[in-house]
Amino acid sequence: MTPITQNPPAAVPAQSFRPSMLWHALPWALAIGIYFIADGYHGLGTNIMIWILFAVSLDLALGYGGIITLGHAAFFGAGAYCAGIFAIHVNNDPLLGLLVATLFAGLLGFITGMLILHTRGETLLMLTLAIAALLYEAANHARWLTGGDDGLSGIRVAPVLGLFRFDLWGKTAYLYTLSVLFVWFVIAFFVVRSPFGRSLDGIRQNAKRMRAIGTPVWWRLVAMYALSAAMAGTAGALMAQTTRIVGLSSLELLTSGVVAVMLVLGGERRLYGAFIGATIYVIVQDLAGAISPFIWMFVIGFLLIVIVLFFEGGLMGIIDDVVNRLKGRGRKDQRS
Amino acid sequence: MTQFLTILLDGTSYGMVLFIISVGLTVTMGLMRVVNLAHGAFAMIGGYIATVLVLKLGVPFLLATVLAAIAAGILGGLAEITVYRPLYRKGELPQVLLTIGLCFVAIAALTFFVGPTPLPAIVPAWLDQMVDIGFRLYPAYRLFLIVVGGLLAFIVWLIIERSLFGARLRAAVDDPQMARSVGMDVSRMFTITFVGGCALAGFGGAVGAGVLPLEPFYALRYLVYFLIVVAVGGMGSFRGSLVAALAIGIIDTAGRYTVPQFGGFLLYLLVFALLLWRPNGLLPPKSVA
Amino acid sequence: MSEADPILKVRGLCKNFGALAVTQQVDLDLARGARIGLIGPNGAGKTTLVNLLTGMLSSDAGTIVVDGQNLEQAKPETRVRHGLVRTHQINTLLMESNARDNVAVAVAERENYAWRMLRFGRQWRACQAEAQHYLEEMGIGHVGDRRVSQMPYGEQRLLEIAIGLSLKPRILLLDEPAAGIPSTEAHVIHDALERLPRDIAILLIEHDMDLVFKFAKEIVVLVMGRVLTRDVPANISANAEVRSVYLGRSAV
């Protein structure tokens, strides 16, 4: 019997190009196309993209990291208030404001993550809720800084890079948001496929196993949580800069709930699930909200129940199933 | 001194409402291990039904609250059988989302049938007066809440600690696998407990409308409080939920009266610190201790 | 440190659960490349000992020295980095991932790639290539793409060993690698164990006596949390005391 060698061949297979990779261009081509044809809907488009960014950030923490949270609005709101306050009191350059808000939310995620990520399950859920509630109360009572329940208004934003002014029709805002979303998406795309992302997927599945192979589980969860918080902070900052107002609702439980709903509607752990979920949610809200503000709640609530009970992978899961049916079976395991 | 006693009374009556609504939640979460965010919806439905009965049909207050409890219990039973059962085997996220979905549906339905404006509190004339309690005049309604809450706590205690059903229930909370393996009909127990919990919530929503005002977003607005009671008391712990509900009622009231500039901040900070210190709550059942 | 010094040196290890002393004054030396079997009746504290060694439980007293370094206070993940690796008795594999990725995350961890967030391409494929190598060495190279939840139990046991091996351990604690496998197939596990690299010190905890006596050069008998004796297999099976507390029972 030959002993097992522990020095495997150093050859690493090269990444091969597959035609299916071209699908990644689709959502971006669509977003750019919409810019040219959808006059009057740029505001709605911007809003959708902001929610997509927020939902992708939740996908990192909740979907990939398995960090069960109902308080992600804390970071969205923190980013929004930070960007608004920074623009009013310090500097109204949009990119600088975005950066500051992102770092602020990321730092907040890092600190709170260090505190709470020892816990799991219902306790963790409650702690994330408590953090969001704490920030909500803080923002509510610091009227001198945040405007309290009147909201923070009077935000003025300078032209992007000193060149592109935020116009009345929201065209600049649309492209600005799209660019930021793209940058963050590329980062998220790389992160979930990196060894780091794989190890988090392992932690989600079985933290004990990961500890047994030498993973510092807590630190890694904190890192993912902070990254996700930073991303949510960017989304909040975009909301502040493009709508020029920040309300207390950005910190509400409902906001945390809504973004989770979007994620699961589209399908978690897919990144693009957030795209579909957020788009559908915002559009349904817009259409049904025009009839009665409560019809959309009924539709969304009903959809959620149906999805959880019958379609665990969300809408993207349904699409996958259909594609697999068409292709013939047997490709289900190859989601790498 | 007067202010101190007032805080104590106000806090206790408020805490009793929290207890009546939340005790069902702590038992079901402890027993079934389901993150149930729709519990507030059952309280809200109970409150709405009672209010409509009193205002539109002239049903007496007490009868209306009992009918509201029965209706909430029936709805809870239906929900348990249809949507909760498949949920027990799923993870926390599906549980969170489905129950949020239930909240949304309940909010939309109530708005559709009753309207989006907050409802007036239904306090009958015999409770809507001041009673001399020695050091000051005090609203009879608040005293009523304290008495009713105490009474219900005693009844629930009797059921849980003194009845055969309660003994089985406690065994199932402490060791779910054991309960199943000795042949308990766990799924029937789930349904009965869930119906009871929802009926209590519906009753709490109805009698407590003067403390927790009814409006369409009630189910989400006060949800945090109900969850805090469960988490602080220890999931599945009856005594824990009573202690936690009263403590939260009193601390929250004290905070709002003495340092209004901090509002609910104080409460959340305490809850946050407590959960970091004791992740399973004050009085967790044996299975998680 | 000389070559002759044991790679693992345990002295006076104690653990109590309340009034119950589950591990009492355990001393244990493993030389480099040792092949030691650990046996004992149910409740002797074998799994507790493994948990103490790997840091899943914290001990009440004693030292655990790996290659001259005391790791008694170290976290589980730190011990793994010092080459003290275990496999699991019950499956704790990543059931949703495929077999290759189960090994690849371990390789990534060992190589300290796992903090790298943005360089996903080459390094991850390198981890996967190495993972495939270990799968093939274990004879399960053909199931690399299969989800663990869809693998037969025997292959899962081999995957468990492949993961342990991919961490390049200096000491490998095998916690019942053949548990749940029909005795007719235990030879597959035995063959795999025989082929483990010579320089790894191995402590095998196993109920299957055939496997232990074939594999181990020396056997440690644990009874009531104490080391009863340590000897070569032939003497262990002849030892009257061991027979009475342990082997005797199965002969009845």
Image: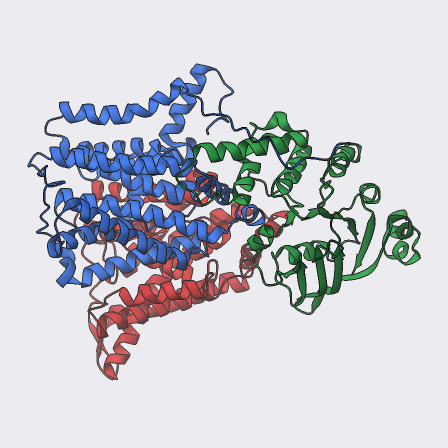
- B188 left or right of C85 in image: left
Image coords of residue B198 (percent x, y) = 39, 51
- Tell me which colouring the rendered structure shows: by chain
Q: Nearer the viewer, residue B52 or B246?
A: B246
Q: Is residue C149 visible?
A: no
Q: Nearer the viewer, residue C157 or A141?
A: C157
Q: Residue at x 52, y 61 (%)?
A: B285
Q: Does residue A253 sit above or below A51 in this rendering?
A: below
Q: In the figure, residue C45 lies in which quadrant?
A: bottom right
Image coords of residue C224 (percent x, y) = 78, 61
Q: Residue at x 27, y 70 (%)?
A: B253
Q: Nearer the viewer, residue B87 or B134?
A: B87
Q: Residue at x 9, y 48 (%)?
A: A156
The residue sitting at the left extreme is A168
Q: Which chain is green?
A: C
- C95 left or right of A273 in image: right
Image coords of residue A311 (percent x, y) = 41, 31
Quadrant for the N terminus of chain A in the image:
top right
Q: Is residue B48 visible?
A: yes
Image coords of residue C20 (percent x, y) = 70, 66
- B213 left or right of C207 in image: left
The residue sitting at the front extreme is C2
What count of labels does the image hold? 0
Q: Which chain is blue?
A: A
Q: Which chain is red?
A: B
